[in-house]
Amino acid sequence: MNLNLIGKRALVCGSTAGIGWASAIELALLGAEVCLIARNEEKLKQRLTELPAESGQNHHYLVADFSKTDEVRAALKTSKGDYHILVNNTGGPAGGQIIDESAEKFQKTFEQHLVVNQLLTQHIVPFMKAERFGRIVNVISVSVKQPIIGLGVSNTIRWAVASWAKTLSKELSHSGITVNNILPGFTMTSRLEQVIKQRADREGKSTGEIEKEILASIPSGKFADAEEVGAAVAYLCSPVAASVNGINLPVDGGLSASL
């Protein structure tokens, strides 16, 4: 199975922790040269020293806060956009009942996810077309298959990103570029810890009680590891996945009830 990414360059978003970091490691292990992009430069510098480089890669980083599109535009001006792989990954908004959410929160989340994805993609796709090889993987959520109660804004925007990606996959497929979505379920990251705490506070329960309730809803009976999601991302970025295009791939332990 051809998983070799030696000679390929990857831009991985939100890559100092969680699924983004796990994805960066897996891509580097397959030989890709990785550019980390996140908002904390000190963390980026540290992570750069920890990335595997057995194939002699020269990994690097860009600094940008995805909640500020001006910062993203500025960061892209310092980059030639010569990446074969783009992993779009951004932390979700705080939870809450959708009826209580402000219009401003919807707008901010839309910019942070879909608009930033669009900016990054427009910057990189010309190079992918010239190379006749491109992999765009969006890390979104299993809420694309079924909305998660208490994450109303996230549910809404994740659906928008999935629709954007499906449209893009049709437009770019003739250029050797694939566009796919990874749909994590409950994955043990700091984001999940935050969601559990918010739900516990909202329902007047302990975090342990909420964890048990969530685990009971997952057929596998376990939270996913970030490394498991990162491995799925890396597979979709590999040469062997050339005909996998425009799909939503759940990595959720069987949580989703949809086909």
Image (cartoon, rainbow, N blue to C red):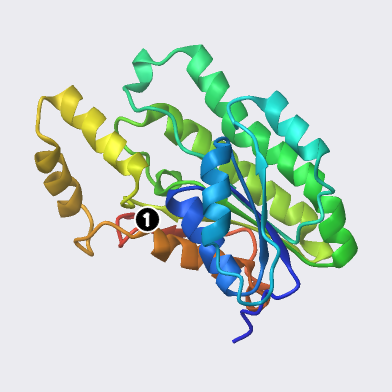
Horizontally, residue 52 falls left or right of residue 227, namely: right
User: Taking 139 as reference, is 53 left or right?
Assistant: right
**x, y (%) of residue 227?**
41, 63
Which quarter of the rendered picture does the C terminus lie within?
Answer: bottom left
Q: Which residue is most to the bottom?
A: 1
* Residue 218 at least partly seen: yes
- Residue identified by numbered label 1: 258
Foreground of the two, 44 or 255: 44
Compared across the picture, whether 189 is left or right of 9 comes to left
Q: Going 9% across and 41% down the picture, which residue do you hit?
A: 209
Badge 1 density bin: few <14, some 14–19, many ≥20, Cα 10 Å: few
Label 1 sits on a secondary structure element that is: loop
Q: From this viewpoint, is residue 15 visible?
A: no
Which residue corresponds to the image point at 59% horizontal and 87% vertical from the top-left? 1
Residue nearest the viewer, comparing 102 with 233: 233
- Residue 10 horizontal/vertical position (percent): 68, 59
Residue drawn 57% across the image and 20% down it: 107
Q: Could you tell me residue 233's position as x and y percent?
A: 53, 62
Task: Please identify the quarter of the rendering in which residue 146 is found.
Answer: top left
Q: How many marks?
A: 1
Q: Nearer the viewer, residue 19 or 115?
A: 19
Residue type at mark 1: give it. Ser
| Horizontal and vertical percent position of residue 237 | 63, 66
Taking the view exactly as shown, the residue that stands out farthest to the right is 130
